[in-house]
Image (cartoon, rainbow, N blue to C red):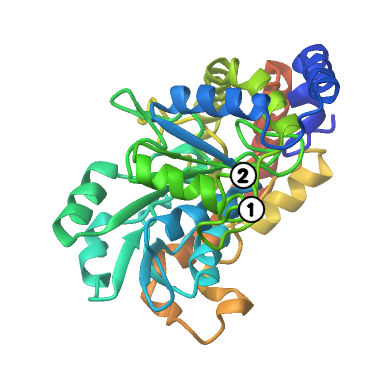
């Protein structure tokens, strides 16, 4: 059996007929940029997230960058970021001329609220919590700290479409949030795409301007902006899949529960915490000291896995000699031990049985 870490073709197969109809509707309508399909998706996604506004942009990185800029982050400012995340969280800050200030994470890879206060300086402007792997950061603690110190909170919700805490969706806690619609996300497009969500009318207006050359009226530019717009074709296709997102996330949870029930007994594997019932399982990530052996052995059995992420941002060449890595032990531990199993709502029980049996086989072979 051959099981990819993620299969985009299988993930999109149930929507094929509707996607074709939506694509033809966009092409026949002729409005390919900033048209009615984008407006409809923005309304629907804002409603889904529980926010007043959604601004579609070109990708998740631009969503973070524009949200931070609209919140007032400028060159010379400092922004608190988790030590363990995809590089986009950090590069969005750096591209504005601001400085990413690392805050080490918990064992689940989420920014540790207990370490935030010590990282704040007079130059600190914002906090960017990341909802890693589909699990929400501790927003209650983070928002309380932000209010106390007068900081802006911009959620990086790129991996948390639909995640909730006490009924409130990811992306609706901070002053704004950034989503990615990269094809492998829980809500994935057919190329790059992203969005900013917010309840702040002024921030929304600023983001509408910034994504379109600083303009809301054609040929009149109130600010210097970017060209980063979610096109109508992607918006129409995303709208089709949005209607099924909750059902898709429920199936992902079932996949995670299956993994946990069969793998939690192995001492050499640390399974993720299943107590967060509103997690949406963008990834199911094991921790193992035997990662290389396990990954290579599973590949020989046809099971592909991923590593999210093997190199923490502070260890990346682009930040070389900028940070003291010894200050971030939890991020280093995670980067050395994380292993992502295949995850998708399309996975069948026989495939899950094969994956877990393969893992059991590898673990038992290593003991013998």
Quadrant housing residue 186: top right
| 246 to the left or right of 203 | right
Q: CA distance from mark 2 to mark 1?
A: 6 Å
Q: Secondary structure at mark 2?
A: strand
Few, some or many C-alpha atoms within 10 Å of disc 1 (few <14, some 14-19, many ≥20)?
some
| 70 to the left or right of 148 | right
Point out which mark residue 340 bears: 2
- Residue 349 can be seen in this image: yes
Few, some or many C-alpha atoms within 10 Å of disc 2 (few <14, some 14-19, many ≥20)?
many
Point out which mark residue 32 bears: none
- Residue at image point 76% right, 48% down: 297
The answer to which of marks 2 and 1 sits earlier in the sequence is 1
Residue placed most toward the observer, 200 or 110: 200
Residue placed most toward the observer, 211 or 306: 211
Quadrant housing residue 112: bottom left
- Residue at image point 51% right, 60% down: 223
Check the image and report above or below for 120 versus 147: below
- Residue at image point 58% right, 50% down: 211
Quadrant location of the N terminus in the rendered image: top right
Residue placed most toward the observer, 337 or 179: 179
- Residue at image point 40% right, 62% down: 81
Disc 1 target residue: 307
Where's residue 146, x and y in %? 22, 55
**Farthest bottom residue in view:** 321
Q: Secondary structure at mark 1?
A: loop
Residue placed most toward the observer, 332 or 183: 183
Answer whether labels 2 and 1 touch (C-beta < 8 Å): yes
Check the image and report above or below for 102 versus 355: below
């Amino acid at each position: 059996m051959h099981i990819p870490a993620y299969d985009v073709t299988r993930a999109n197969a149930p929507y094929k007929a509707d996607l074709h109809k939506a694509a033809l509707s966009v092409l026949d309508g002729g409005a390919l940029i900033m048209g009615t399909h984008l407006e409809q998706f923005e309304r629907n996604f804002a409603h889904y997230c529980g926010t007043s506004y959604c601004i579609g942009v070109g990708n998740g990185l631009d969503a973070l960058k524009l949200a931070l800029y609209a919140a007032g982050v400028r060159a010379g400012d400092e922004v608190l970021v988790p030590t363990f995340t995809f590089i986009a969280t950090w590069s969005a800050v750096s591209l504005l001329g601001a400085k990413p200030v690392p805050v080490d994470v918990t064992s689940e890879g989420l920014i540790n609220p207990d370490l935030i206060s010590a990282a704040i300086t007079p130059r600190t402007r914002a906090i960017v919590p990341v909802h890693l792997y589909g699990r929400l950061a501790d927003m209650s603690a983070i928002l309380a700290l932000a209010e106390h110190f007068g900081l802006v909170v911009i959620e990086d919700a790129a991996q948390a479409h639909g995640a909730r805490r006490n009924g409130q969706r990811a992306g609706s806690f901070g002053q704004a949030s950034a989503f990615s619609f990269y094809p492998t996300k829980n809500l994935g497009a057919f190329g790059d795409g992203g969005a900013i969500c917010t309840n702040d009318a002024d921030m929304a207006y600023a983001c509408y301007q910034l994504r379109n050359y600083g303009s809301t009226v054609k040929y009149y530019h109130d600010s210097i902006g970017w060209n980063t717009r979610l096109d109508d074709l992607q918006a129409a296709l995303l709208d089709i899949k949005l209607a099924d997102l909750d059902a898709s996330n429920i199936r992902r949870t079932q996949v995670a529960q299956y993994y946990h029930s069969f793998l939690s007994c192995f001492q050499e594997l640390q399974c993720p915490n299943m107590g967060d019932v509103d997690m949406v399982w963008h990834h199911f990530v094991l921790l193992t000291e035997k990662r290389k052996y396990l990954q290579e052995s599973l590949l020989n059995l046809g099971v592909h896995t991923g590593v999210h992420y093997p190199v923490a941002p502070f260890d990346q060449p682009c930040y070389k000699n900028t940070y003291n890595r010894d200050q971030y032990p939890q991020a280093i531990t995670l980067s050395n031990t994380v292993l992502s199993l295949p995850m998708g709502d399309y996975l069948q029980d026989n495939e899950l049985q094969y994956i877990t049996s393969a893992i059991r086989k590898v673990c038992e072979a290593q003991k013998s």
